[in-house]
Image (spheres, grey):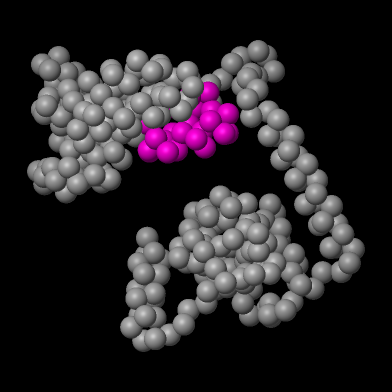
Amino acid sequence: RAADVKDVAKRALSHLLGKQLPDIASISEPVVIIAKEITPSDTSQMDAKFVKGLATDLGGRTSHAAIMARTLRIPAVVGAEDVTSTIKNGDMVIVDGLHGDIIVDPSQTQIDEYQAKADSFEKERAEWAKLVDAPSVSKDGQHFEIAANIGTPDDVADAVKQGADGVGLFRSEFLYMSSDHLPTEDEQFEAYKKAVVGMKGKPVVVRTLDIGGDKPLNYLPLPEEMNPFLGYRAIRICLHRPDIFKTQLRALIRASEFGPVEIMFPMIATLAELRQA
């Protein structure tokens, strides 16, 4: 994202010019952060113990600040346009992240009202937490499987914590993209085994290698194409390179000894290609 590149450039320039940037990590008392924009490096320093809310002039629901705020459970209102010009340092501020409201210098009645809302919300969250492991059944008795998408075995812990019924998609390409070589059978086996064991008997669906398009590998050159998203990628590469494909399949079969494993193929191929394979 452009904002990410600008953030890196700003931090590099601050070192070159000897300029001190605001240090969010040094905040040691409860505050609401008011800023024109929150950068990725800013959000990485936030401690929810002290940062009780944030409001920015710029940004949207998919901005880095908004995503990180949701992850850290920090109330946030982004894209408010004029908060830096209307709110001064030292002002008392209420940030309502659920409805997008910002109240400057609230009355005691408003403070009491929002404190009651915050307490009610926390109680509601506590009730939701009790249902984490409850079956996902609709009012008419229909069961729905709620599964997690993961990119690495380390994501399994959070999936279990949130009560996932299984892993609906393990994007195995991340094992390849985070490596400087084709992962060996043993390396892949250990990764898949960790995910399977971590899910404690719940199914793990692993998608076989899906590279090409917007997911290149530095160590595996691919041909340049007018439309790489529908060209030589995913299952086509696997069918053309059985040495890569069979290595992954063997690792998956070995991992299935430790729990239920299902294999999904990224279908970017014609029926004729599949029949020929």
- Image location (x, y in percent) of residue 51: 64, 63
Residue 95: say if magenta: no
Q: Quadrant of the C terminus?
A: top left
- Image location (x, y in percent) of residue 136: 61, 21
Closer-to-camera residue (247/268) = 247
The vertical placement of 200 against 170, above or below, is above
Q: Is residue 44 left or right of residue 48?
A: left
Q: Quadrant of the N terminus?
A: bottom left
The vertical placement of 63 against 212, above or below, is below
Q: Please report the bounds of the magenta region as a residue range.
A: 147-170
- Image location (x, y in percent) of residue 161: 57, 34
Identify the residue shown where x is 47% and y is 25%.
199
Which of the 4 image quarters holds residue 152?
top left
Name, please, the residue furthest toward the right: 109
Q: Is residue 45 left or right of residue 233?
A: right
- Image location (x, y in percent) of residue 221: 11, 45
Number of numbered discs present? Answer: 0
The vertical placement of 54 against 274, above or below, is below
Identify the residue shown where x is 71% and y is 58%.
96
Q: Is residue 124 left or right of residue 256?
A: right
Identify the residue shown where x is 56% and y is 50%.
71
Closer-to-camera residue (214/11) = 11
